[in-house]
Amino acid sequence: MKPRIQVIVMTLMVLSFCDSSFYPSTPIAEAHVPHECPDSIPDEPILSGHLDQSDIVNRNLTFDRITKVGERLFTESLNRCDGHGRPAATGAGTPTSRKPDQPSMTRVSGPDSNSCAGCHAQPRLGGSGDFVANVFVLAQNLDPVTYSISNDFSDERNTLGMMGSGLIEALGREMTADLHAVRNAAIALSKAQGKDVTSPLVAKGVNFGTITAQPDGSLVTTDIHGVDTDLIIKPFFQKGVSRSLREFTVGASNHHSGMQAVERFGAHRTGTTDFDQDGVPDELSIGDITAMTLFQAALNMPGRLMPKEPGPAKSVDRGEHLFRDIGCAGCHRPSIILNSSDFCEPNPLNPPGIFNDTSQSYCFDMAKQGQKPRIEKGKDGKMIVRAFTDLKRHKICDETFSHFCNEKVVQGGVAVDTFITRKLWDVGNSASYGHRGDLTTIAEAILSHGGEGRSARDGFAALAASDRMDIIHFLKTLQVLPPGSRPVVFKERGSIN
């Protein structure tokens, strides 16, 4: 190891943010030594070391320190010395090799970003992205790299905001448990009675069809809708194909930055510590991914920015009632009850290649820790998540209203005309709209709905212009708020009080 790099290992200042006083005087725990620049590049890595999962689990590090490191990993523009780039690997979820003579970065199939914050930046860190930050989903699987942005090769998607994502994953876990309980009860009853048993699949008031259990233990799943037949709610990606923030983070780190997680690409799975052949081994430790996941899970939930003046306030109130009356709330459910505010990482349902050892869990209380505004507990200990989604997939286009039928490449086995219900709790300051981000107004997004959204769309179109504007005024109150805000903030004459 170079002496200069050795000094960096022990120098916490390199790992800290602008305010280096945040960190204690002891160095960060490392899973392995800091990287050195490959090919004798006369430079140095941005990161000075890596988090060890055992130090997280044993609480040798404070929650604030873990999430600060996660924020840095999310924010920093990493370089080749850190492992940025994947010359001999595609961005596919399963480790897949390619010829190592591809461009180091390409806007289409990636790597296409220096940091997570390059896309997740509106209205602030952890938020959504401008149209210019669109990603081309599934192009990363191609070899050689394609320069085409035709939708024959990829699905162009706008960047979604991550605010409140810890609550969303927690809802997904609880809904999954509900659906699995229904399935297991049907299996047990069918065996006991010796006949088929059909049960409605309902989780937190959301109907996912029915499942039929047969006496031999087999299942008829043809009447399940809005979720995969494994009955696991997957609340991330616009298609609803990723079950956890960790799964999302591991995949995105490789796809967009060529930063490869040991849990998916390490020697225990691929036989090498440098699967992408960029000269940098073991680029992201299990602890690194845990820190990035916890940072995102601890981002504040969106809230409401309400007008104080009577006229605008009445418009918002009318709009909220009309939103329900015309049927928008059927899919964009204004609230869902969350039973537990504990977020435990990792998710036990993570798939192979994603760390899921719950004996090494780290938990925090989303009602007490993380950015404000946080979720608030009721007297019964339960919480109301006002995300305006049902975490269910729906067909949202048809032959008449085909704007959302633009995709051709199937992702995760989900039909190209089907998407998970978009969370609206940040819609007021997270433009633009639609899964491609090519609609500049909320009204355009509503009027583009077809398929299962057709009835609500037609109801909106039939309203008087003033009523439609009331709905828009209501939706614009749903916003990402400044850190430290109350869940509901009142605005008067352009200032936040």
Image (cartoon, rainbow, N blue to C red):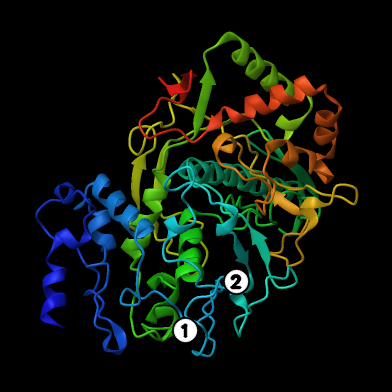
Extreme residue toward the top, this view: 310
Residue holding disc 1: 87
| Nearer to the camera, 466 or 258 | 466
The quadrant of the rendering that contains the N terminus is bottom left
Q: Residues within 10 Å of mark 1 (few under 14, many from 20)?
A: many
> Where residue 11 appears, x then y in whole percent?
13, 64
- Furthest-right residue in this view: 400
Drawn side of residue 188 relative to residue 51, left or right = right
Comparing 173 with 376, the one in front is 376
- Per the image, label 1 sits on a secondary structure element best described as loop
In the rendered view, does 398 fall on the left or right side of 306?
A: right
Q: Residue 391: image x %, image y %? A: 63, 43
Q: Are marks 2 and 1 in contact (CB under 8 Å)?
A: no
Along the line of sight, which residue is nearer the eye, 124 or 287? 124
Q: Which residue is mark 2?
A: 108
Would you say 33 lies left or right of 91 here?
Answer: left
- The spot of residue 165 in percent (x, y) is 49, 45
Of the 4 image quadrants, the one containing the C terminus is top left
The spot of residue 407 in percent (x, y) is 75, 61
Q: Residue at x 46, y 44 (%)?
A: 166
